[in-house]
Amino acid sequence: MGKQGQVRQGKRWYARAWVAPLAVVVAAFVAFSVPPYLAVDPGLSRVPAPPGNGWHFPVLVAHVVFGSVAILTCVVQVWPWFRQRYPVAHRRVGRVYVFAGVLPAGATALAIGAVSPFGPLNQVGNVLMGALWLAFTVTGYRMARRRRYVDHRRWMIRSFALTASIMSNRVWAVVATIALTPRLDTTFGGSPVALSQAVSGLAAWLGWVVPLLVAEWWLERGDARARRRRVEERSPRQPVGV
C-alpha cells in the first residue's frame, strides 16, 4: 500500500499533460517580449508612445516587467501537483503573483491602456481588462485570507485567464490582420491607420474575452460534475439483481 502510494505520488507532477506545454509557451513568450524593454531604450519599444505623454515608456517598461512576473508565477500556481505537494510554497508564490505581479501590472495597464495609440476601441478594451484583472485577483486573494478556498480557486482561475490573455492577444492580432487586410481599400477607405486600429481593437477585446469565456465554461463544467456527484451520493443504491 505504501509503495503504491509512493508510485502514485511520484507520477503526480506530470499527471496534467497541459502543464509542460503551457510552461514552454509562457517561457518563450517572455523571452521574446521582455528583452527590448530591459534595454530601457524607447526606440526599441513595440508600442509607440502617444504624443505628449513622456511618462508612457517608463510605465510601459514597468508593466512588461511586472506582467512577466505575473505570468511566470501563474504557471506554477495553476500546477495541481505543486499546489498539493507544496502548499506553503504555493501561498508564498501566490503573494508574489498578487503583489509583485498583477497589482502593479494591472495598475500600469490602466494607465497605458487609457492613452493607447491604437484607437478608442483598443483603449476601452485594455482599460476594462485591466480593471477586471485587478478585481478578480484582489477578490481571489481575499477569499484565500478568509479560508474560502473553493471561492479562491474560482476567482484565481478567472485571474489566470486574464493573465494569460496577453498571449492570445497576439494570436488574434495575426488573425485579424489576415482577415481584414484585403478590405483595406473597401471597408477602410485605403486608410492604414483605420485598418491598424480595427486590428488592434479586435485583438484587445478578443484577447481577453475569449479566455475568460473559456474559464467560465471550465468552472461551470466542474460545478455540473460536482452536482451530479452529490446527486449520485444521495440517491439510494439499487440492490444487486434488481
Image (spheres, grey):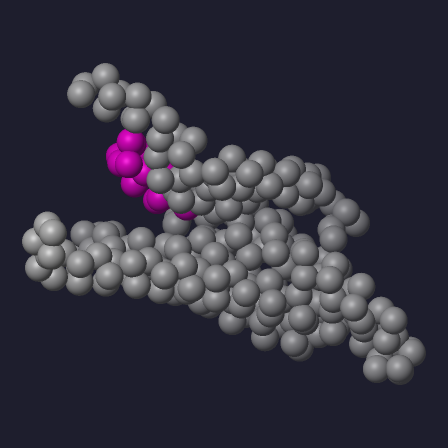
Q: Is residue 54 visible?
A: no
Magenta stretch prevailing secondary structure: helix
Q: Quadrant of residue 206?
A: bottom right
Residue 84 lies in the magenta stretch:
yes
In the image, residue 132 above or below residue 89: below
Closest to the observer, 126 or 53: 126
Q: Quadrant of residue 157?
A: bottom left
In the rendered image, the residue lying farthest to the top is 3
Task: Identify the residue at image location x=39%, y=48%.
Answer: 99
In the rendered image, the residue lying farthest to the front is 241
**x and y percent of residue 87 in the render?**
27, 36
- Looking at the image, residue 75 sits to the left or right of residue 44; the answer is left
Task: Identify the residue at image location x=53%, y=49%.
Answer: 67
**x and y percent of residue 10 in the render?**
34, 23
Closest to the observer, 28 or 14: 14
Q: How many marks?
A: 0
- Looking at the image, residue 53 sits to the left or right of residue 156; the answer is right
Q: Quadrant of residue 173?
A: bottom right
Residue 217 lies in the magenta stretch:
no
Q: Quadrant of the image for the C terminus?
A: bottom left
Q: Quadrant of the image for the N terminus?
A: top left
In the image, residue 104 above or below residue 26: below
- Looking at the image, residue 82 sits to the left or right of residue 205; the answer is left
Q: Is residue 97 visible?
A: yes
Task: Identify the residue at image location x=67%, y=70%.
Answer: 202
The part of the chain drawn in magenta is 82-97
Task: Identify the residue at image location x=19%, y=19%.
Answer: 2
In the image, residue 32 above or below residue 53: above
